[in-house]
Amino acid sequence: MTFPVTSPVLARALAERNYNDPTPVQSAVLTGQAEGRDVLVSAQTGSGKTVAYGLAIASDLFGVDGKLGVAGKPLALIIAPTRELAMQVERELTWLYQYTGAKIVSCVGGMDAKRERRMLADGAHIVVGTPGRLRDHIERNGLNVSALAAVVLDEADEMLDLGFREDLEFILEAMPADRRTLMFSATMPKGIATLARRYQRNALRIDVANDEGGHADIEYRAIRVSPRETEKAVVNLLRFVDAQTAIVFCNTREAVRHLHAMLLERGFATVLLSGELSQHERNQSMQALRDGRARVCVATDVAARGIDLPNLGLVIHAELPHDAEALQHRSGRTGRAGRKGVSALLVPITRRRRTEQMLRDAGVQAFWGGPPTVEEIRKLDQERMLLDPMLTEAPAEEDIELARLLLSERTPEQLGAALIRVYRSRLPAIEDVVDPGNGPEARRETRDAREPRETRNAPVRPPKPQKERFFGSAAWFRLDIGRTRNADPKWLLPMLCRKGNIEKADIGVIRVFENETKIEISEKVAQDFAANMRRPGGENIRVDRARDGAESAPSTTPPRPPKPKYISKADRKEKSKPRGPDPS
């Protein structure tokens, strides 16, 4: 089946992008029944909606001669919930309309509003923007909507979730009554139906979510984890799946910052997306993912709404989504445009029932299991190494000469071992993670296997001798981070090694207090460690020389008053008796 496109310039752009067969949503929107009508489309994210409505509104933009006139008042308006999605839509429409001479202008929050008004004043055929910024331009007479022939609401349900109802109503009421309105939404809550009844005329209802099988290209995995090993499970999943691009979801900005820093210290090329970043910082993160400088994105739900990352093969829910709709929005970042993807939920034992219910509500079936083990990952590493381009590509003549020289000096086994070490040095270390099982019984068995309990009648063991310091004299350092900021030796240790440029053997005791952490560093590397930790980059943690690590700094909280001594009722009666002279 080919695209039912009559415009040769649009057909040329589609052919250059290898768009040969339309997706179900594209076929539904481009039928004769939908031509020229208002449509209300229910379709999952990643189903090709942008190209669908880009082709659908073409007839509203082209004149009788099949060409676009001189850019003036906008003819089409695309409204998207987030800056990232609006800019993504602009990029898609730019290549689709590249041979039409169309002028496309984006208007999004966080960008220069004065520059946008100048571009609008110079004329535009299509305007793409977010509700708040579009309303601002209309109110300031920067955006003239009197000539609009078509308006598209992309991800309409997300715009309502983000609180843009009032802005949407203002924009729609400012438009000509005879414009064409196309609404696209992954879900159809009551708010969308109300909006459609109010602002659409005899709309054609198109539901391709079920026919398309919105989750057909996504493999769902529910990973049992211990709450204290969530970060380790994230590391192993990233190593196991080895996706070209992956996104890890957290529920809070603080969790995003913490996990981002931990993955950086582990050696992953990672960026973050959260609402506290400026638009410039968010653009930098997205560009790093698109050009391959970063492979992992740690994000909150709000920051990642509507984004389309190239070759995104893995979604990890480091913290469980709040409901089935959030699960669908998160997972919909992968498995797009016919590509396969994996959505992995990290499920603590106490949240299993809630997770099962959420999966049922979302209409998906997940494969349950434990986190990837060290043995499984090492086996995959061996298979991937044999397929690595450094072994499969034809060697240059210079490389062959150097190989002959090495073989004359070393045995093949030595060279093979060196090659393996080089290959492994490029990979983040694997974590030793335990599968907690399916319930309390399995959890007890796991704990008993790791730490056997002493029975009540067992003999009292003598205290263990204090471990000797294995690197001689040591210096103590103080970090201005403690339990209140989730300080944990699990991520502090690799961070100290990497940023301080020291080995694990140079670090002794790590003591985490309420508001600070004290660490023991070998005296021979202490001076270099202190200098390296003051360099910019990584976690913003202050490091100072400390007297020792015996105790934390004094707390500013006043001590509690001592509890009054308990006096029994008999003693109180005795004290209350009158005391007379001793009869003796």
Image: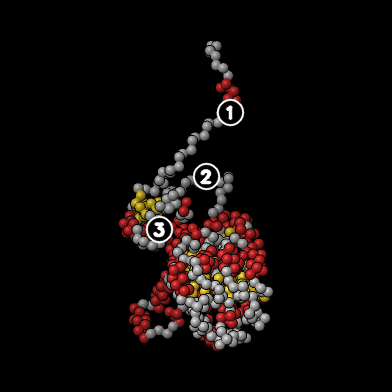
Q: Amino acid at mark 1?
A: Ser
The residue sitting at 38% across, 62% down in the picture is 537
Looking at the figure, which quarter contains the N terminus? bottom right
| Viewer-nearest of discs 3 and 2 | 3
Q: Are marks 1 and 3 in contact (CB under 8 Å)?
A: no
The total of numbered circles placed on residues is 3
Q: State which tag comes first along the sequence, 1 or 3.
A: 3
Q: Are marks 1 and 2 in contact (CB under 8 Å)?
A: no
The residue sitting at 53% across, 76% down in the picture is 74
Few, some or many C-alpha atoms within 10 Å of disc 2 (few <14, some 14-19, many ≥20)? few
Dot 3: element: loop
Query: Which of 435 and 214 lies nearest the eye of the viewer?
Result: 214
- Residue identified by numbered label 1: 568
Few, some or many C-alpha atoms within 10 Å of disc 1 (few <14, some 14-19, many ≥20)? few
The residue sitting at 65% across, 68% down in the picture is 198
- Where is residue 58 drawn, in percent x and y? 57, 81
